[in-house]
Amino acid sequence: NNKKKNPLAGRPFKERVFFGGDLGLSFGTITYIRIAPVMGYAITPDLSVGGGPSYQYWENNRIPNSGQSMYGGSVFGRYYPLDFLFLHTEFEFLNVEAIDFSNDDILNRRVNVPIWWVGGGYSQRSGRSGFFVGLYYDLIQDIYSPYNDDFIIRIGGFIGL
């Protein structure tokens, strides 16, 4: 019986869809803004997939004209081996401003940067809503990645329809 294996089997699409994302804000010497909404789909109660667009702004106030906008999107998969613990994989693609030094010239150009996050974290779920804290590692480590560290911490939330 399929419903015994997956309690979501046969449920309407709207009962399996959730919305969420994360928001990052930092002001001071470094200004950082991140807006990343997501839409996801619960395949089973323990496995979900989704994706969404993202926008980031970064500026170091000590460096004139250092501000840049970065935009792109991502797709993700999340699995809960325990009710409160999740494993996460996410492929993010960002368009960023790159600076190349060539023949004593400084060249600014936009490049596409692939980032592949893997990791896990803690999630508090109640019904079809909740929040999460995750620690992710970038497997690709592209030279133009806007992330200073190979590890990031993300905090976010989600809500079912």
Image (tube, rainbow, N blue to C red):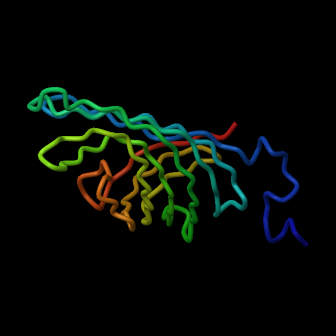
Q: Outermost residue, left direction?
A: 62
Task: Report the quarter where the C terminus lies.
Answer: top right
Question: Quadrant of residue 140 in the image?
Answer: bottom left
Q: Outermost residue, right direction?
A: 1
- Position of residue 90 measured from the top left corner of the image (x, y, whole percent): 50, 58
Which one is in front, 17 or 105? 105
- Position of residue 151 measured from the top left corner of the image (x, y, whole percent): 30, 60
Which one is in front, 29 or 7? 29
Residue 33 in sight from this viewpoint: no
Which one is in front, 7 or 94? 94
Task: Report the quarter where the N terminus lies.
Answer: bottom right
Question: Quadrant of residue 57 in the image?
Answer: top left
- Position of residue 143 measured from the top left corner of the image (x, y, whole percent): 29, 58
Q: Does residue 44 appear to the left or right of 146 in the view shown?
A: right
Above or below: residue 141 compared with residue 29: below
- Position of residue 42 measured from the top left corner of the image (x, y, whole percent): 69, 54
Residue drawn where x is 79% and y is 61% of the image: 7
